[in-house]
Image: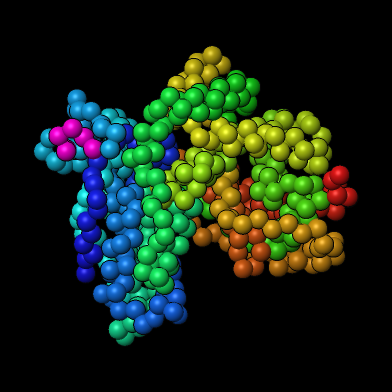
Amino acid sequence: MDIRFSGSRSGTAPLTWGQRAIWDTIQKTAPDDHYFNFGRVLAVPRRARPLTVAGAAEVLRTLVERHESLRTRLGEAPYGKAVHASGTVADGSGLHPGGTAPYGGGAREGGGAEPWQVLATGGSIPVTVSEGDPERLRDALAETAFDYGNEWPLRIGLVVDRDEVTHIVLVFCHLAADGLGAEVTVTDLRLLLLRGSVPGPPPPSPLELARWQGSEQGLKVAAVAAAHWESEYRRIPPTMFDRRADAPADPPIWRAHLVSRAMDLAVQRIAALRGASTSTVLLTAASVLAGRVNGHDMSAMLPIVGNRFRGDTVNAVTTLSQEGLFVLDLREGGFTELLRAAKPAALRAYQSAYHDPDDRDRLTERASRERGVRIHPYCCFNDMRFTDRVDASPDEPSVRRALNETTLTWPLSQERLNCRFCLHVTGEPGGLGVSLTADTGYLSRPAMERYLLDLESLLVEAAFREVLEPVG
């Protein structure tokens, strides 16, 4: 079945900073760019039942009409045409003459002009209706790359039990939303199911965001961020992982996933006693160990930052997340001293994340020429949790007993990734989840496993050997 929608406007604009950042990443990862697809499953609230397929379709139509990013695809820039303040092009056309977008069938590698975002007024989105496990349907919908120029950036599934819809499955193209944007979408979907409407006007759209980023105010924000990147690129190691491994695995990209209740308890204790967020504690520890791998005395890591600091973008359904630059001098001392230095360094990293990717490309080329070597950390950190909990009460015996519950699995392997080292943090039923996705050409599978277990050990030791009393 299909869901037909009809929005209030169409338009064309350059990609936003976040869209350009993820598009560059998608291109470098193709043909394995399905890696960036992600999904959400919403169990239909009891008060919204029974929900028919037709009723679900009506709610989803309203959702897509509310959020313009869900009906925005890639297309060519209009040649010689001005984009009005409304976001529409002078002659109403957002595509190259002929009306076809050259971005179908997966991402292209290199070459060609950068695409623009093309918002459509109306269309229809296919819906998969099935019985069974909603998580399995989510995974099936996410397992292939989006057709960026021709496919809508949202895949929809309905799980039914006889004639009743029990779960709604949404799979997002990362050009349309990041994790926080997806959460806003699901919240709105739930409100539509329960109340039939979402209070207030829609949040700013990608078209409006692109206009602000090109304004004088947006350019000033970009300039501040660029200055941080440029100054730090002159002093950090050229890359964090520069030594080739003897024998890369086949395929070369692997993911190790560790779930540790002991690490969760230790991180909460450190954060509570030292007046830091658990994310900063984890970023600090991850940077320390990343520096140790190849003997660097300075660590450079790229934390993924949500960039929702402005009031009008807090609830935006788009992709705002970008990499910031976190730099930590590992000669500062023990873990407690490093954590103290990490707090202001993390704030600078968060500020630098809201940047123009073109600025970053230019300053990277300039710094690389000056230093005579390509500069890129290739070392990412992504805390995907939405809440932060701190607790100083866990005692050492209970934390050390929890070490026996730690598990490590290998859930993913593929041919390509745009990075050499990507650390993801998630909340899991069994504790803290830390996934390391790495290029085994630079970090072998045994070294990946050792890194994660060392991370757990470092934090457990720091919780009881260095962090002895509260701050203040």
Name the residue rendered at 38%, 59% in the picture.
Answer: 171
Is residue 26 visible to the viewer in this orientation of the structure? no
Determine the residue positioned at 35% across, 75% down.
159
| Whether residue 362 is situated above or below residue 125 in the rendered picture | above
In front of the other: 263 or 359: 359
Q: Give the residue furthest to the bottom.
A: 162
Question: What is the x, y in percent for residue 223?
Answer: 50, 23
Relative to 407, does residue 419 appear above or below in the rendering?
above
Image location of residue 2, percent across then percent down = 21, 66
Q: Residue at x 47, y 44 (%)?
A: 312
* 260 w.r.t. 364: above or below: below
Is 91 magenta? The answer is yes
In the image, residue 213 lies in the stretch drawn in magenta: no
Figure quadrant of the N terminus: bottom left
Residue at the location (67% across, 40% down)?
A: 287
* 106 shown above or below 392: above
Image x and y of residue 78, in percent: 20, 31
How was the colour assigned to the protein in this rendering? rainbow
The magenta segment is 87-93
Snapshot quadrant of residue 134: bottom left
Q: Most prominent secondary structure in the magenta stretch?
A: loop
Residue 177, position as x, y percentages in the image:
41, 50
Quadrant of the image containing the C terminus: top right
Please identify the residue farthest to the top as the structure is shown: 370
| Marker count (numbered) | 0
44 relative to 3 in the view: left or right: right
Q: Is residue 44 visible?
A: yes
* Nearer the observer, 56 or 31: 56
Viewer-proximal residue, 117 or 428? Answer: 117
Residue sitting farthest toward the front? 200
